Amino acid sequence: MSGLTKDVVGALSTDDRAALEEALATKGFTYDDGKGLPNIEEISDIVIEHHTNSQLPKFQSLREKIRELVRDAILGVSHPDISNQVELLERLKRRAFDRPTNVWFLTTNYDLLLEEACAEVGLKLINGFCGATKRFFSEQEFSIVSGTTSGSRFTPESGLTIRLVKLHGSVSWYRKGDRVFEAAPSAIVEQDARCMVLPRRSKVFETLSGPYDGLFRISNSVLGRRCKHLIASGFSFGDSHINDSLVKPHISSGGISLCNFCEVEPADLSDLRARPNVLHVCRDKKVIGGRETEEESEAWMFSKFVELF
């Protein structure tokens, strides 16, 4: 988050930077260039709120510029390193032992690292889109199971299938009317039509509309039923709409067990730390069912997390 924040703020013009500082001052903040704080989510919320209250053109301009820079930063990585993603999928593939196996990935990332890694490893990927040259979104894709029939007997397709739910959209998604399509990012002409919930702390209203409402509904139906264990890597749990609708209810009911690998224990899950089905593995401690022990770990880094498999 700090890297994206620094990239966006660093690319602002002198006038936009001055407008940003003016908006931050209304909440008692000043931007820290070294730490990248407040982060881009907090900045977006403050700027949008200040523009709504003031209706001044300079804050409208700043709001649009931030959105543009966030989008460009995401699209600007031309040759991403997917070695860790490939390694993770290869390890999961080996553990499937060629049996019919489904692993669900829930992510708020917009990038295509998992999609590219699946192709490299040769895994089937289901992401809610179907079609050939022009793929369109359909919730039913997530419930489809491939296999063969012999008489009245159905045999599921062997091997590992990745079911990827991108809760906040993707750089490869775009909206046309009331429908959502998927294409290579470079093939999407209408930049503003990209289907992404950009970084804000108050994203809940955006996720109430399609396709996000369907993605949350699918995730909610999977957790506690088909998925009993939720393993988190590098997720801040700072999104209240995800915590309140997907995470906390299923932990509280005992429907899922959470194993969270993080640098710092998430404050937004503090009310659940004493539950026996919650484990936090942090940089300098481990918290199991509310019991805290000092223990150093590097598993909060994705490259080290992958090695656990």
Image (cartoon, rainbow, N blue to C red):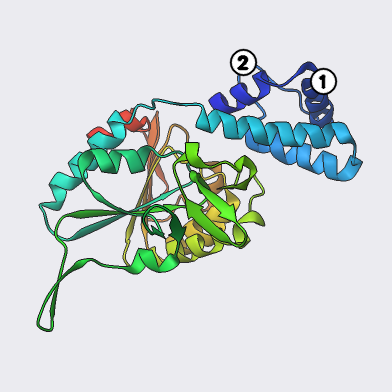
| Residue 220 falls in image quadrant | bottom left
Using the image, tell me which numbered label, if any, was put on residue 34.
Answer: 2
Residue 245 seen anywhere in this rendered image of the structure: yes
Q: Residue at x 18, y 46 (%)?
A: 93
Q: Residue at x 47, y 42 (%)?
A: 109
Q: Residue at x 78, y 27 (%)?
A: 20
Q: Amino acid at mark 1?
A: Asp
Separation of marks 1 and 2 at Cα, in angstroms: 21 Å
| Residue 250 falls in image quadrant | bottom left
| Residue 66 falls in image quadrant | top right
Picture quarter with the C terminus = top left
Residue 47 spot, x, y in % from top left: 77, 36
Residue nearer the viewer, 65 or 243? 65
Q: Amino acid at mark 2?
A: Gly
Q: Which residue is mark 1?
A: 15
Among numbered discs 1 and 2, the one appearing first in the sequence:
1
Residue 149 spot, x, y in % from top left: 13, 75
Residue 33, above or below 96: above
Residue 151, above or below 165: below
Picture quarter with the N terminus = top right
Residue 33, above or below 216: above
Residue nearer the viewer, 37 or 105? 105
Q: Residue at x 64, y 38 (%)?
A: 41
* Residue density around tag 1, few if under 14, some if 14–19, many if 20 or more, within 10 Å: few
- Position of 235 with respect to 148 (left or right) is right
Q: How many numbered dots are placed on residues in this image?
A: 2
Residue nearer the viewer, 122 or 175? 175
Q: Secondary structure at mark 2?
A: loop
Residue 207 spot, x, y in % from top left: 60, 57
Closer to the camera: disc 1 or disc 2?
1
